[in-house]
Amino acid sequence: MERWWPIKTARLLLREIQRPDEDDVHEYASDPCVSRFDSCGPNTREKTHEVITRCASWRVMEKLGMRREAHFVKDAFRKGEWRDSYLYAILADEWLAGKT
């Protein structure tokens, strides 16, 4: 997948999350009002650190050559409501070919 970021304008910079962003991310991710409609949260400090260091998103999976193979509608009940999930996969020979 081709990189489309960062996006820079006179008033905005969109880029990947980086470790120095951890305090700022934790400030909003630990707020119950902010995480109300998110599938997880409010975060503990440890959970925010894990998210920042792993940052296991759909974009990362697609950059690694994985593809979305399934969309499960309302299959997970979290925070009192049903949420959708996606399944990503890659074949072993595709993975090995991408590593050479």
Image (cartoon, helix red, strand yellow):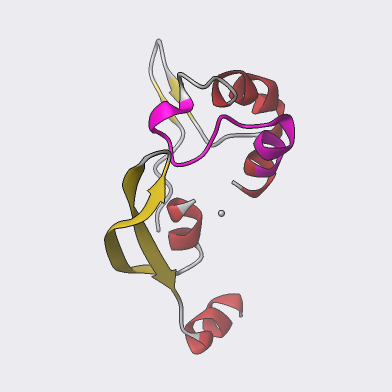
Above or below: residue 89 compared with residue 42: below
Left or right relative to 30: residue 11: left
Q: Residue furthest top?
A: 11
Residue at the farthest front position:
80
Verify whether residue 75 appears in magenta: no
The extreme left residue here reads: 73
Q: Is residue 76 above or below residue 49?
A: below
**Residue depicted at 42% across the width and 27% down the height:** 36
Counting from the top left corner in percent of width and height, residue 49 is at 71, 37
Which residue is drawn at the image coordinates 56% and 54% (left, top)? 56
Image check: 64 left or right of 23? left
Of all residues shown, which one is farthest toward the bottom? 93
In the foreground, 69 or 5: 69
The answer to which quarter of the image holds residue 99 is: bottom right
**Total numbered labels:** 0
Choose top left, top right, bottom left or bottom right for residue 42.
top right
Against 36, residue 49 (above or below) is below
Q: Position of residue 32 (x, y in %)?
A: 51, 22
Q: Which residues are magenta?
A: 35-50
Residue 46: x, y in percent? 74, 37
Image position of 13 with respect to 19: above or below: above
Question: What residue is shown at x 51% (from left), y 40% (from top)?
Answer: 40
> Camera-side residue: 86 or 59?
86
Q: Is residue 41 magenta?
A: yes
Query: Image point 42% across, 68% down: which residue?
Result: 88
x, y percentage for residue 100?
A: 61, 80
Horizontal side of residue 96 vs 78, given as left or right:
right
| Quadrant position of the N terminus in the picture | bottom left
Q: Nearer the viewer, residue 94 or 67?
A: 67
